[in-house]
Image (cartoon, rainbow, N blue to C red):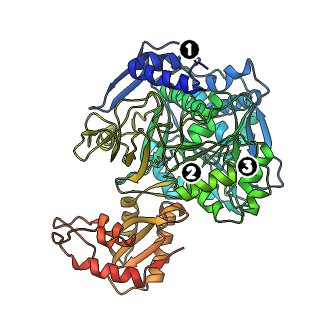
């Protein structure tokens, strides 16, 4: 691949070209893919109106690039290795040829069940190959997939289905996760009580547990028997939506980020190949869930676009013991391993015997994603997993960016612990001060991107104004991702964390406002504030400050609120601590000063600064005292 920079010279050249002639750079890269019709224009954009279009007029189908084109020269190569939750169940190898046939069959099954181009199809499934197959089958027929993470609750699922007006749901009777079974069908049934747009529910049989059966339900395996595996790829416009993926915002409902076919294809393949330096015979494993963007871009699309072998693991890192990840690396001779800092921290706390039992000598590259990686975790990863011989790529990106924007290229550019390092060639990352002025050299500021890249999300489903306002209005002329960053004298970026009310808990992006809205619905709660605080495994955890309307048993309230959040959003959003207080620090205009609460819970009282302008400075003393004696740990 001409756009595979496997030495520093090629990298430097690419950087220069992308700067001096971006259209030629991106156009040349796009030409390495299969298009039904070449584009008329590489890029058209206007950050003011938040409009971005890539490869205008180009026609393609991403699955022809993920599947068909590999059939010519590597039909028998393993595309997917499936490692089931249960160690006693055999792993499955699916070749490119088989994957092509399976995707085409499922695509035909979707058509037979009423799906057409542009329809939204919701996937609420376990981490099994059929999820990847369903994703690709939607893309094959031009339906827009909306994958909802299997850990979300019924109401979170129905909100997402309704927002996108999905026509079909694909789920499973259940999913295995460690020692537990997630009753996906049961949760989906509950969600579908409020989802009139769903006309068909296709159920994959995974656990064989008894489930309820409704009028709109059909079995996946029965429907498949009715169709064959000939399915021409629907011809899509480069700018047609490929998928919607929901991510939390600091306020309001989750945002359905829309990604489109052409640009997403070009950028995910480009970033996958260059960051991980994937070689033809390598086995690559990303431990994320396909329910998140990491799974979309770097389990499914990126690896398959370049013809890689990608591992899909159904279970959790601790099952049946804390050696499972390393056992899988050993078993499948994994060469590139990509995970999240929260997993590294969890595994680092366990006995080294779980690592030492296994042969990790095949590993060539380690990756990290989802939140800043702390130095201790970085060093452990480097020493015990990488044996000091594997470059670590600390990849910074977002659901909205579609692909990795800042990262070292494994073994090619220099790594620096806790730094994501340099922007990819073609990415113009800058630091801005509070007034939106660019700052040069070694500095601290907010991160912004100056020009579009092909996989930038094009809009928020059904709400372009919100998209414009969140990402393009605060700093006109830039894409604003919402993160703060440091830059060293060599241009390396270190992401310092969110600058808005989003908290990243175990790598999951959680807006605090939607959680507060749920907590405020409890009959004993008058008002609440949710803030993040440092946590040694999760990176950050949530603390909820509550004003109650009556004397309450704090333990009981904590449990009730925890259950409420879990039911409404999902267990991932459960707060770790609760504190009942008489007042919350507010400005004179009544805005809760969450910044002060964050400092208090982090024990950084001396950094709070002048509080004389607050409406109620006394609240700070009360909270300080209470934090010392009785914040309830929810565990
Ligand atoms: O704050 C950044 C953090 O995760 C946010 C994006 O979250 P999400 O859309 O869920 O996507 C996660 C997977 C790409 C970012 O705004 N983040 C992600 N990667 C890093 C990171 N923070 C620091 N270092 C990273 N490598």
Mark toward the start of the polypeptide (1 vs 3):
1
Q: In this view, does 20 lie to the left or right of 89?
A: left
**Residue 325 placement (x, y as % from top left):** 71, 53
Image location of residue 9, percent across then percent down: 54, 23
- What element does badge 1 sit on? loop
Note whether residue 173 is visible: no
Give the labeled residue for mark 2.
Answer: 149
Residue labelled 2 has its Cβ within 8 Å of some atom of ligand 1: no
Q: Identify which residue is drawn at 31% across, 64% down.
A: 595
Q: Which labelled disc corresponds to residue 205?
A: 3
Residue that mark 1 sits on: 36
Mark yes or no: residue 416 visible. Answer: yes
Real-space Cα distance between discs 2 and 1?
33 Å
Whether 30 is drawn above or below 615: the answer is above
Which quadrant of the figure contains the C terminus?
A: bottom right
The spot of residue 381 in percent (x, y) is 63, 53
Per the model, the C-alpha gap separating discs 1 and 3 is 36 Å
């Amino acid at each position: 691949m001409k756009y595979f920079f496997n030495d520093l010279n090629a990298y430097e050249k690419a950087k220069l070209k992308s700067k001096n002639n971006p259209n030629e750079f991106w156009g040349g890269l796009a030409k390495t893919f299969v298009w039904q019709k070449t584009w008329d224009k590489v890029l058209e954009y206007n950050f003011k109106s938040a409009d971005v279009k890539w490869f205008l007029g180009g026609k393609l189908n991403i699955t022809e690039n993920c599947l068909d084109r590999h059939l010519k020269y590597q039909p028998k190569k393993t595309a997917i290795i499936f490692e089931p939750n249960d160690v006693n169940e055999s792993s499955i190898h699916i070749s490119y040829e088989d994957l092509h046939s399976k995707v085409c069959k499922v695509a035909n099954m979707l058509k037979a069940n009423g799906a057409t181009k542009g329809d939204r199809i919701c996937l609420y499934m376990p981490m099994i190959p059929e999820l990847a197959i369903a994703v690709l089958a939607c893309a094959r027929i031009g339906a827009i997939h909306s994958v909802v993470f299997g850990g979300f609750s019924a109401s979170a699922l129905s909100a997402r289905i309704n927002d996108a007006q999905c026509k079909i749901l694909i789920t499973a009777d259940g999913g295995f996760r460690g020692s537990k079974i997630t009753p996906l069908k049961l949760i989906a049934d509950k969600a579908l009580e409020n989802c009139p747009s769903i006309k068909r529910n296709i159920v994959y049989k995974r656990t064989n547990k008894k489930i309820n059966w409704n009028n709109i339900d059909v079995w996946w395996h029965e429907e498949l028997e009715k169709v064959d595996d000939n399915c021409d790829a629907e011809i899509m416009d480069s700018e047609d939506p490929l998928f919607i993926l929901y991510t939390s915002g600091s306020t309001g409902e989750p945002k359905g980020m829309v990604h489109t076919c052409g640009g997403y294809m070009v950028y995910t393949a480009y970033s996958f190949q260059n960051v991980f330096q994937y070689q033809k015979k390598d086995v690559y494993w990303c431990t994320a869930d396909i329910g998140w963007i990491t799974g979309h871009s770097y389990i499914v699309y990126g690896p398959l676009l370049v013809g890689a072998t990608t591992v899909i693991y159904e279970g959790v890192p601790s099952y049946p013991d804390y050696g499972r990840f390393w056992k899988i690396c050993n078993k499948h001779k994994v060469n590139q391993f990509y995970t999240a800092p929260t997993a590294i921290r969890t595994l680092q706390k366990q006995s080294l015997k779980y690592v030492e039992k296994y042969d990790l000598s095949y590993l060539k590259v380690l990756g990290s994603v989802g939140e800043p990686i702390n130095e201790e975790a970085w060093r452990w990863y480097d020493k015990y997993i990488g044996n000091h011989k594997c470059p670590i790529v600390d990849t910074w990106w977002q659901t909205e960016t579609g692909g990795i924007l800042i990262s070292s290229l494994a073994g090619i550019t220099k790594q620096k612990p806790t730094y994501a390092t340099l922007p990819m060639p073609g990415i113009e990352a800058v630091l801005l001060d509070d007034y939106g002025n660019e700052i040069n050299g070694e500095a601290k500021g907010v991160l912004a991107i100056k020009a579009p890249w092909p996989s930038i999300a094009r809009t928020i489903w059904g709400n372009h104004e919100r998209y414009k306002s969140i990402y393009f209005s605060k700093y006109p002329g830039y894409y604003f991702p919402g993160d703060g960053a440091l830059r060293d004298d060599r241009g390396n970026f270190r992401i310092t964390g969110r600058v808005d009310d989003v908290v990243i808990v175990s790598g999951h992006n959680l807006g605090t406002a939607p959680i507060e809205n749920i907590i405020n619905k409890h009959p004993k709660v008058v008002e609440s504030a949710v803030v993040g605080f440092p946590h040694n495994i999760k990176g950050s955890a949530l603390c909820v400050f509550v004003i109650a309307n009556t004397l309450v048993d704090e333990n009981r309230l904590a449990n009730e609120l925890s259950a409420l959040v879990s039911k409404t959003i999902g267990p991932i959003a459960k707060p770790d601590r609760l504190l009942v207080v008489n007042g919350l620090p507010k400005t004179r205009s009544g805005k809760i000063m969450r910044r002060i609460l964050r400092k208090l819970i982090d024990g950084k009282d001396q950094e709070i600064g002048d509080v004389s302008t607050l409406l109620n400075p006394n609240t700070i003393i009360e909270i300080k005292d209470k934090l010392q004696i009785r914040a309830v740990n929810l565990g």
